[in-house]
Image: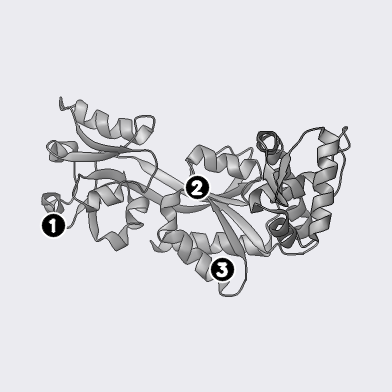
Amino acid sequence: MVGKTTTGVTIRQLQIFREVLRAGSERHAAKILKITQPAVSQQIRQLELEVDLALFARENNRLVPTDRAWDLLRSVDGALQSVDRIEKSIAAIRNEEADSLSLAAPGVFCLNAIPRAIQAVRKNNHLSFQIRSGSYQQIAEHVLNGRADLGVSRLPLDERSFEWAPAATARNVCLFQTGHRLAVKDVITPEDIIDEALVDIEPQFAAHQMNINALRYRGVEPDLAVEYDANGHDVGFVAAGVGISIINSLIAREYRQFGLEFRPFEPGAVYHYVVFWQRGRQLTTGMRKTVDELLGAFAAT
């Protein structure tokens, strides 16, 4: 797909430019793009002429990106991601399956659910996967902006922008080492954890406020041993005996190989997890298979 901007820069030139920065050399970029190295060099020279910027310094037959090159990449990368998405959609319409798929999801689900789903997909479909992690907001932005084909997140999502399939429902649980005194409880309450050190997510997250306020309501200032900024960072501290953690049951089940235990925590909240994609997007066979396997993996946890 080749189009020109008002300056004469082509989308293809920008795509080649992006790949050179990603790959680190013209030779590697040419291999990835399946074109010749001289063709890459020619497109880069033409791009520099069109934008009237020195994008690379040439040292010992190597291209070294300048600061201007990285500035340009940041400016155009979002647009190029949208072009990538359009090209994938056109390929799907032509029934030409893409050989790669990008999935945005909380990194914690790469411990169990997502690897099992990808293993199942690749038994009969040689798809390669790119995994993008981040906060729930960042995951939605990845899918919305075309940087990811599919996403795993929890509701609410903007139904004007996304479609989704329900994956799992989770509730709050208390996570602790095997043999901990809390293991005798069927349900754990704030009174039960008054003297416990906590491994808790940072204050900007709603879950933190709920956990901490439950203790402060009872006149107790919590003992915060560790605060972390992303789901999945708590498990090592809990396994080491630093403290306990209040998380949700879907995340807790990702930690099975750590030999920890968890019990329902009340009062708690309910979380609805989904696999989602851009509204109106036609799913390829590979995308549909991936959705199905993700749903199965989350249901099995």
Residue occupied by mark 3: 121
Tell me which residue sits at (62%, 66%) in the image. 127
Label 1 element class? loop
Q: Position of residue 131 (x, y in %)?
A: 54, 54
Residue occupied by mark 1: 179
Number of residues whose C-alpha sits closer than 10 Å to that of mark 2, classed few (under 14), some (14–19) or many (20 or more): many
Residue occupied by mark 2: 133
What's the amino acid at mark 1?
Answer: Gly
C-alpha distance separating marks 3 and 2:
20 Å
Labels 3 and 1 touching (C-beta < 8 A): no
Circle count: 3
Q: Position of residue 233 (x, y in %)?
A: 34, 46
Tell me which residue sits at (83%, 55%) in the image. 39
Q: Is residue 65 above or below residue 286?
A: above
> Which of label 2 and label 1 is nearer to you?
2
Mark found first going from the N terminus, 3 or 1: 3
What's the amino acid at mark 2?
Answer: Ser
Labels 3 and 2 touching (C-beta < 8 A): no
